[in-house]
Image (cartoon, coloured by chain):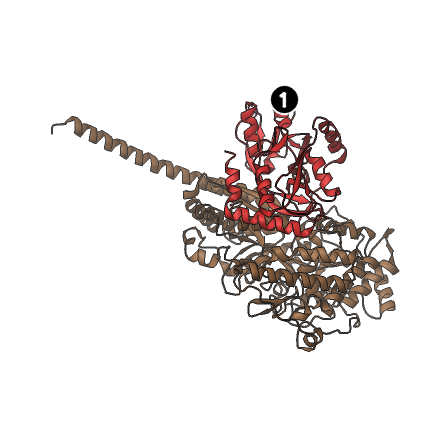
Chain colours: A red, B brown
Amino acid sequence: MFGSNRKGVKGARVFTFLGRCCVGLVPILLLSSASFAEEKPLNLVTFIEKPLIDQKNGEPAGVVVSVIKELFRQANITYTLRLMPPKRAILMTAETDNYCVFPIERSQEREVKYQWVSPILISRHGLYSHPNKPIALKTLEDARPYTLGSYLGSGMGEYLESFGFNVEYAGRNELNARKLLKNRIDLWVSDTESAKFLIKQERLPLSTPELVFFTTVRAMACNLTVDSNVVKKLQATATKMYRSGDAERIYKTLN
Amino acid sequence: MKLTCVRVFKIFFSFLVLLGITARIGYAADEVTGHETVAKKWLENEFNVSTLSPEEQMEEMRWFINAAKPFKGMTIRVVSERIDTHVYESHTIARAFSEITGIHVVHELTGEDDVIKKLQTQIQTGVNLYDAYINDSDLIGYHYRSDKTVALSDYMAGDGAAVTLPTLDIDDFIGISFTEGPDGKLYQLPDQQFANLYWYRHDWFSRPELQTQFKALYGYALGVPENWSAYEDIAEFFTVHVKELDGQRVWGHMDYAKTDPSLGWRMSDAWLSMAGAGDKGLPNGYPVDEWGIRVIGCQPVGASVGRGGALDGPAAVYAVTKFVEWLDKYAPPEAKNLNFTEAGEWVGKGNIAQQIFWYTGFTASLTDASLPIVNEDGIPKWRMAPSPHGAYWDEGMKLGYQDAGSWTLLKNTPPERRDAAWLYAQFAVSKSISLKKTLVGLTPIRESDIMSDVMTEKAPYLGGLVEFYRSRGRDVWTPTGANVPDYARLSNYWWQFISRAIEGKLTVASAMHKMAEAMDAEMQLMADESNLKCKPVLNEIEPEDVWLKREGAPKAMRNESPKGKTLSYDEAIHVWQ
């Protein structure tokens, strides 16, 4: 068995962006009503990633949230759910008892820091170019001379940086689309579902990705103090939901 | 003849059809010629070393061009870990294949643990994440049991016959025994291989003053250690007695121990096999393998000594105790906080005298002429040699690990996509490509490549890699085998429990005992939940003494400090001739 190591994100730049983007987002708390078990509710945190995760009537919404709600309903486990910026959600979960965050990439580097329920979401990630400056990409290597725009906490930026790509970070995914159109980056790195939604919703003059270069399996990561039996129960339920088609039925409502 | 309107129309229509067919044939012919021109360019400019003649290479390219026609325009996705060989595939071979065949390939690179998680996800959810995986053959026990993986031997003779390269030459693959199940079927096709071998500073070991000093202290020659006692003596010699060479602090041992999945690989790959925990037998010990898992027939019956396994037996405890002790006493203090990749680059700094277990996958990065461990003429100051064995090792046992990253097709991939991916897989290992790939990544898979004149010329610059792969040693350093029923489910236990011993939260004996119990419990769950072929049926627990008195593994306590034995480099590399 052999493997790899990804370099960390450049700390100072990350936290500068984090500071800027946290100001505008007030965490929203939702207490589940579907609580049958007696244990202390699990504190779930997630982040806006339209159209997969959004905010509706002040509460987290979207297909990924629906999958999580169904997962906890079937597992009969109580929870609270709130929104916060992605980087903060990940850090809070790593450092706080009884917290879980979703949907984050499950990687070798993160493996030991959390307990995992996987998969929650399978994403494909693409590179988008400016309409007036198309960049033909046959392989990821072709993107090496360019400045790539990712967002804090996405995992994709770290992945690309570990290969020596020049990555700039924004606070949220949609900001990169605007940076691309203002020629502040050469290629926008985004998961294809989010990009499709943003292009349509904001009527951006962008087309299909130049290259869909990576697939991620995203998961719910839980703090190491969370009862391992609860995690095991959630994992078993998640697997059952995929096998039964329940997860697919919910994800199909997206299109 | 009177031409009616209908007849005129028919003649005109026939003319159009004929014109269309001719144009189509012409276009198709042009297209094929175009692909051949592209192929020729790639053969001349990139794949210009091969055991095939240029004409034979071109024949292979023509076969790929024709076989790929039904899939032209398709985009396929494959995934592998990120080592030099796969980087070359992802950047160069995928591009060549796309241009030559018209099938676009996205070859993703990620950590090996991530590859396994993705494969597991595709199997669990039925979602076709990838059309093919380059997955270590360590999972062979799962592939043949699960019925989720395409048996390539069946596929090549059946549904995949039309897309199987006539010149693939399966017998030329040196690691094919690693990718066959106990049922004799081939489940995976090796794409790259590397071994874990002993690594040492040949230049330091050759210094007369150090030889004299070592002999005076330990009573035998400074050389390639044949057993762990000698390794330990040499570690102590450099760390404690020599301390400084050419003005810099030097260390007699290097390892890594950060809590990380790669810590587990250190153990599950080879540490226990080097110590001698398992039984005799190749490629893996039988009935007890190097994970300490006993089988009856093909069914795992336990990992703990109480059930006939060896995971918490004296040999396993000895192995991990030495791991922790050497790390504490002889390695640089930073070692405990390094993972596999970080530690791999450390020996390049030039302050490490030896490493018991070093992956030859790092060869390319340690032959860079700018490093302090390489001479000006490009010949390394270091050598690789067979690993020393521990006190429980006996003749006839495996002596280390070999990674065989292998093409793996899953049954739930749509057939058309699977066929197109299989073409790319074969392209990447074809004789037209493989020798160049071997020179780039130094992870040979073919007998024809390793025996080639090109590799003979290259040998002096590779520190012993060619010599090893030309020896019988390549059959004695083997991957995880078929006793392990589900690698993905069991492998996490290694880093989880070994890390507790390293951190001092548990004694080594207690950590190994708890890990053996956890593995037994997981295998029981597999038996209860799954439809695996040859699924586990755990033995009833018997007193440990009863098992330890029986022949083979688990082995009773031995003298763990026999006298150290060393060999000269020439003797060491000829042990496995």
Q: Is residue A133 above or below residue B363?
A: above
Residue linked to disc 1: A182
The image position of residue A145, as x and y in percent, is: 64, 32
Where's the N terminus of chain B, which quadrant? top left
**How many numbered marks appear?**
1
Using a 10 Å C-alpha cutoff, classify the residue at mark 1 as few (fewer than 14 neighbours), some (14 to 19) or many (20 or more).
Answer: few
Where's the C terminus of chain B, which quadrant? bottom right
The part of the image, by quadrant, that contains residue B562 is bottom right
Q: Is residue A108 visible?
A: no
Q: Nearer the viewer, residue B449 or B355?
A: B355
The image position of residue B531, as x and y in percent, is: 52, 59
On what subunit does the disc labeled 1 rest? A
The image position of residue B234, as x and y in percent, is: 81, 63
SS class, disc 1: loop
Name the kind of residue labelled 1 in the image.
Lys
Q: Is residue B242 left or right of residue A205?
A: right
Task: Kindly identify the residue that appears in the image at 70 percent across and 73 percent down.
Answer: B555
The residue lying furthest to the left in this view is B1
Q: Is residue B431 left or right of residue B524?
A: left
Q: Is residue B1 left or right of residue B574?
A: left
Q: Is residue A69 above or below residue B197?
A: above
Q: Nearer the viewer, residue B253 or B372?
A: B253
Q: Is residue B526 visible?
A: yes
The part of the image, by quadrant, that contains residue B506 is bottom right
Q: Is residue B110 above or below residue B574?
A: above
The image position of residue A216, as x and y in percent, is: 60, 42
